Image (cartoon, helix red, strand yellow):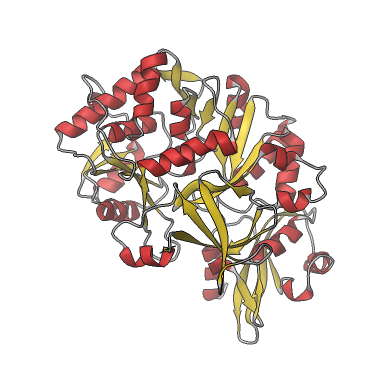
Amino acid sequence: MNLALWLERRAAVAGDTPAIYHGEEVVADYNAFQAQASALAGNLAAAGVAPGDRIAIFAKNCPDYLVVMYGVWIAGAAVVPINAKLHAKEAAWIIGNAGAKFAFVSGDLTAALDAESPVRLVEIGGPEFAAMTAGGGLACVPRETGDLCWLFYTSGTTGRPKGVRITHGMLMATSLAYPVDVDPVTSADAALYAAPMSHGAGIYAPIHVRMGAGHIVPASGGFDAGEVLELARGHGSVSMFMAPTMVRRLTDAAQAAGARGAGIKTIVYGGGPMYLADIVEAVDRFGPKFVQIYGQGECPMAITALSRDEVADRTHPRWQERLGSVGRAQSVVAVAIGGADGISPPGETGEIMVKGLPVMPGYWHNAEATEKTLKDGWLMTGDVGRLDADGYLTLADRSKDVIISGGTNIYPREVEEVLLMHPSVHEVSVVGRPSAEWGEDVVAFVVASAPVEPSVLDAHCLGAIARFKRPKDYVFVEDLPKNNYGKVLKTELRKRFEEGA
C-alpha cells in the first residue's frame, strides 16, 4: 500500500481542518495539502517520473517540504531527503548515487547545487514550483509494502554515506507503532518540526497525517528554543522530536524565562545519548512530557521506547537505572544482544541486534555493506549495550567509540554520565587518544558552566568510577562540534589529536 493514501483519505473525510502551519499562520488545510501534492505528482509524471524513481529534497524545513514528500509518494516515486547543512558537492554526490531525476531545493541552496548537480532543480516556493503544485492532480499510484519510499543517506562519518532503503511497509510499521509505544495522536494535536525534516522529525509526519493532526513549521525554519516555547504556548497540544542537545537548550531557555512549557504535550527525544542529569532537570522543569526512543536509519525510530511514565517515575527502586536506559523493545521488533556464541543472556554486554517489520531490506547498491549489516535476519546495529531481565536496553556506546586502554574496554558514556553530575560541567564528550603505553588514553572535552580545576573533576570521577576509567586529561572548550542533528562529532574531537592540537 502507498503511504500517501493516508493523506488522500484524511482529505476525503475532514478536508477543511487545518493541516500545515508556518509559525502561527495556517497555510493549508487538508484539502489544499492533498490538492497541491496531487498536482505535483501529476506534473512529475508528465515530466517522465515513473514509479520507483528517486526525487531528491535538499532543503531546510519549510511548509512545502510536506507537499513535496507527499507529491513524490503519490506519483509512486521515492524521496531522497538530504541534510540541508551538507556542502553542495556532498549533496550532489548523494543525488548522483541515488540516480535522482529531480531535486527540490531551498532558494538559498539552489545556486550552489546548480553548479554541482546535472539533474533538474526546482526551487521550493519559486514560480516553477507554484506551477507544479497547481491544476489537476494524479490519483495515488499503487505501491507494495516492499517498494522503496525513502532513501536515507547515513552521516558518512567513516567514509561515503550509505543509502538506507526505507520501504512503504517500514514507514507504516514505524508509524503504527508510534501511538502504541510512544504517544497517542489525535486530530487535536500538532507536530512541530524544529528538528530537520530530512531525518527523524520527518519520519513522524505520516502518523500525524493519518490522524489528521496539524503540522507546524517554525517561521525560523529550525530550532530556536524561545520560538518553540512560544509556538507551543500559542497552539497547545504540541508534540515534537528533539535530539538530546536540543532538550538541553530548551531546558536552559525555559529556566531563563521562568517558563514551564505550556502547550507542550510530548517531547520525543533520541538520536544520541541523553545523560541522566539532563533528563532529570528537564522533567523537573517541564513535568511528565518526555518519551525516549532509540532507532537508527536502518530501523527508523522503532527499536525501543521509554514511556513518559517511566521517564518521570522517581518511585521505582531502580528508577535511575531505567531512566539511564533507552526503554524496551517496541511492538514491531525483537531486540537481542549478540555474543561470541550467539544471543547473550540478560546482563551481558554486546552488539545490539534487531529484527522486525521496520528493519531495512538492505543498502542502496551496496551488497557488501548489506551483507555485513544483515545477518540471519538480524540487523547488526553497531551499537553496544545490554538487556536486563525486564527487557530494558541500556546503551554503552557505538562500537567504534569504545576506548580500549590497557586491554580493557572503557565506555565513554559511563564516564560522561559521571562528569555531568558535577555542577560545573555543562557538556562533555569523552574520546580515546592514541597512547604508546596503553593503546588509548581517556580524554574528556568539557564545556564548563563555572570555573573548575581538573583535579576537582578527577576527584569527582574517583568517587564514582574505577580509577582506570577516569580521564587522563581534561580539555576545556567553549562548545562541542555537533552535526545538523545535534549529535556530538567525536570524529572531529579525535582529529585534534591527529593534528597535534
Kindly indicate the quadrant of the structure image that contains residue 5.
top left
Q: Quadrant of the C terminus?
A: bottom right
Viewer-nearest residue: 330 or 124: 330
- In-front residue for pair 13/202: 13
Looking at this view, name the residue that lies furthest to the bottom: 437
Looking at the image, residue 388 sits to the left or right of residue 330; the answer is: right
State the image coordinates of residue 105 (x, y, percent, origin top left). 31, 39
The residue at the far top in this view is 16
User: In this rendering, does residue 431 appear at all?
Assistant: yes
The residue positioned 65% from the left and 50% from the top of the image is 274
Query: Would you say residue 127 is visible in this rendering?
Result: no
Residue 78 position within the rendered picture, expressed as x and y whole percent measured from the top left: 30, 42
Residue 425 appears left or right of 489: right
Percent position of residue 301, x then y: 51, 45
Kindly identify the residue that appears in the image at 42 percent across and 60 percent down: 156
Q: Which of 120/32 is in front? A: 32
Q: Is residue 129 depicted above or below 470 in this figure?
A: above
Image quadrant holding the N terminus, namely: top left
Q: Position of residue 150 (x, y in %)?
A: 35, 44
Q: Is residue 216 left or right of residue 145?
A: right
Instruction: Indicate whether 54 appears above or below 261.
Output: below
Task: Look at the picture and state if 109 lies above or below 417.
Answer: above
Say which quarter of the image contains residue 500. bottom right
The answer to which image quadrant residue 265 occupies is: top right
- The count of marks equals 0
Residue at the image point whose x is 15% and y is 38% from the top = 48
Residue situated in front as seen by the camera: 280 or 476: 280
